Every structure is written in C-alpha cells, then in structure tokens.
Amino acid sequence: MLCAVLMGLFSLEFAVRAAAWGYLFAYPNFVLTARTTLADGDRGRYAHDAALGHVPRAGHSAPGVTIEANGLRRSGEAIAGAPILAVGDSFTFGDEVSDGETWPAQLQRLTGRRVLNGGVSGYGFDQIVLRAEQLAQIYKPTAIVVAFIADDIRRTEMRRLWSADKPYFTIEDGKLELRGVPVPPRAPAASTLSPWQWVVGYSYFFDLLLRQLNLLHDWYGDHQRVQAPGTGQHLACLLAGRLADLQRQSGARVVVVAEYDPVVWDDPAFAAEQRRLTRGLLDCAARAGLATIDSFDALAATGQPRRLYVTWHLNEAGNGLIARLVAQALPRGAD
C-alpha cells in the first residue's frame, strides 16, 4: 500500500510538471527560492535596525516611493515647525500607493503641518510603539498618530516574522520586559528551512496545491512564535500604557487609530473577531488617557468599503478618509 501511494504521488508530480513543462527539467526547492527572493527584495528596501528589526532604507527609491532620513517615507515638502508623527504598519507606510496618496501625506495637505510618515510594512504593534518612542526623541512632535490593524496584535506574539527577527515583549510580574534586542540580522534563507521543507519543498504538486488553498503564509514565510496565541491582546493593552507614558514624557498628544484590512468586508466571522481585538486595544488606550479613532463605521458608511482598497491596502480615497478622521481628532495646535 505504501509503495502504491508513493508511486501515485510520483506519477501526479510528473503529470503536473509535464503540464507546466517549465518544471519538467528544473527541480528547485520552492520554499528556499521564495525565501531567497524575499530576502533579496527586502535587502534593497530595508536596513537592519538592532532596536526595531528593520526600517525602510534611507535613500531608497522606487516608482512612487521615496525614503528619506531615518527611514521616513516622503509625505510632501518640508514645512517649518514641530511636526506630527505618524507610525504604524504597511497601511500607514502606504503599500500599493504613491508617496502623495498615503494618509500621512494627505494629512499634511489637510492640516498644513509637517507630517512624518514613520510607518513600516510588516510591523507588529510592539514594533510600532518602539518606533514611536524612537522617532519622538528625534523629532519632538506635537502629536503622535499610532495606527494599527488587528493582525498587528497577533504579531506581538512572534519573535520572527517573514524570516526577519524582531524585538518582542514578555510579561514579568504584570509588567512588560523587552526581549530579543539587539535584534540579529536576517538569517540566511537556507538556515530557516525545516527538514519537512527541505524534502517536500521540491514538490511542484505540493507547492501548487498550497497556492490553490491559499496556505503559503507559513510555507514561504519563516514565522517563529514566542508567546501563546491570544497573549497579544494583553501585550497590546500594556503597550497602550507605554504610549501613555510617552504622551506624558514628550508632551505630544497620542492618537490611536484602528484601520481594517479588506477581508473584514468579505467575511462576517473574520470581521467579528477583528473588531473584538480592535475594540479591546482601543478600550485599553482610552483608559490610559489616549485619544482613539475606530475607522470601521466611517469606512462602512461609504456603502462600498471594498472599493477603498487597491488589493490589500487602502487606495488614495481610503487613505483620504483616514486622514480626515485623524485631522478631526488632532488637538488644537496640531491642526
């Protein structure tokens, strides 16, 4: 029976390779190839940072993307005066849109104040808070806008995301303890594969099957968990307290903004869980004395919120909506 199963799998592998033709005579390890490609791409876009893991590389440019000093994305012409600092993940950075279409860039045009785009793609909420602390020391902003999506809460449970190590927090006696710093440089792609991936990674059929099932996230990405699932909710709540400390120490008003990925509008069960996580963090932030914005109702009120996205991230119109919500919530003197 075992021989029959193996013969069947080999026959299936040969059949799909013959159908694709290109892989009939080429036998790469698909996991290694994907992780090597990711590492090569990230090496050009990002610089290693011992405190944060990675930041956009100063001086990097691509069509529609310009990175300036300290890994800040260009949000317009420099304007005199104390700035507004925006931090967050890829939704703040503005993946899939050009420099002028991000919500920090649109916020700058709305307010007439300099807005620094400190968003970094792939960040967890822990990295977002550390980035806010780091940049606040440098730029002395009048307001700090901290944006997140629900998945950023889960990311706080990880010590490695997309094959790149990151700082993380543990909870000791009810308090946050920073771990994993200095963050080591990205490990060579070949060192991140499991024995299973070294064997099955050569199967074109298995790779094709995972593509069809949309299960490549953990196959191609090297993600390493350090906290139990669900711990991120407690971590994020404590991190909101850390933002409150930053507000007191810097004198800058902190505004916490919840954004949403597009699946929220496609899957009611997923939406319910994302909103539960989001409300939990916003409630913690409000109890800590921070201003909060939940963009869900405003996005839903457009009638067709799915049209506010490019593929995964907000388009120019969607970012414009976020910018308007933030502008309305900024304290006097920062607008």
Image (spheres, grey):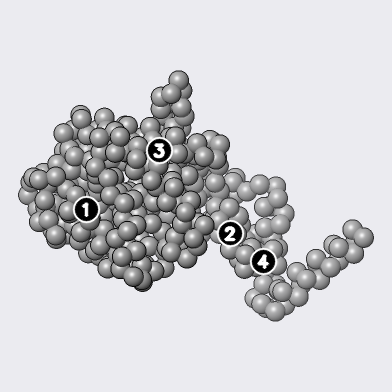
Name the quarter where the N terminus is drawn.
bottom right
Q: Residue furthest top?
A: 173
Q: Please state which amino acid type lies under the numbered disc 2.
A: Leu
Seen from the viewer's position, the closer of residues 146 and 27 is 146
Image coordinates of residue 59 in percent, x first then y, are: 27, 54
Give the vertical position of 2 relative to 176 (above or below): below
- The residue nearer to you, when weighing 316 against 95, is 316
User: Within 10 Å of the Cα at label 4, are there few (<14), some (14-19), or many (20+) other Cα atoms?
Assistant: few
The part of the image, by quadrant, that contains residue 94 is: bottom left
Name the residue: 45% across, 39% down.
233
Q: In the rendered structure, find residue 326 and report the number of the disc placed on it.
A: 1
Dot 2: few (<14), some (14–19), or many (≥20) neighbours within 10 Å? some
The residue nearer to you, when weighing 132 against 266, is: 266
Give the residue at mark 2.
216
> Label 4 vs label 1: CA separation?
43 Å
Is residue 44 visible in the rendered image? The answer is no
Element carrying mark 4: helix
Q: Amino acid at mark 3?
A: Ala
Q: Nearer the viewer, mark 2 or mark 3?
A: 3
First in sequence: mark 2 vs mark 3: 2
Q: Check contact, mark 4 vs mark 1: CB within 8 A.
A: no
Which marked residue is nearer to the observer: mark 1 or mark 2? 1
N-terminal-most mark, 3 or 1: 3
N-terminal of the pair, mark 2 or mark 4, is: 4
Instruction: Give the residue displayed 41% in from the left and 27% down from the top.
Output: 176
Task: Kindly report the distance in space between the C-alpha atoms of the residues bearing marks 2 and 4.
Answer: 10 Å
Residue farthest right in this picture? 1
**Which residue is disc 4 drawn over?**
209
Could you give the CA–CA distance between mark 3 and mark 1, rounded to whole angstroms?
A: 21 Å
Q: Amino acid at mark 4?
A: Leu
Q: Residue at x 71, y 57 (%)?
A: 200
Circle 3 is placed at which residue position? 236
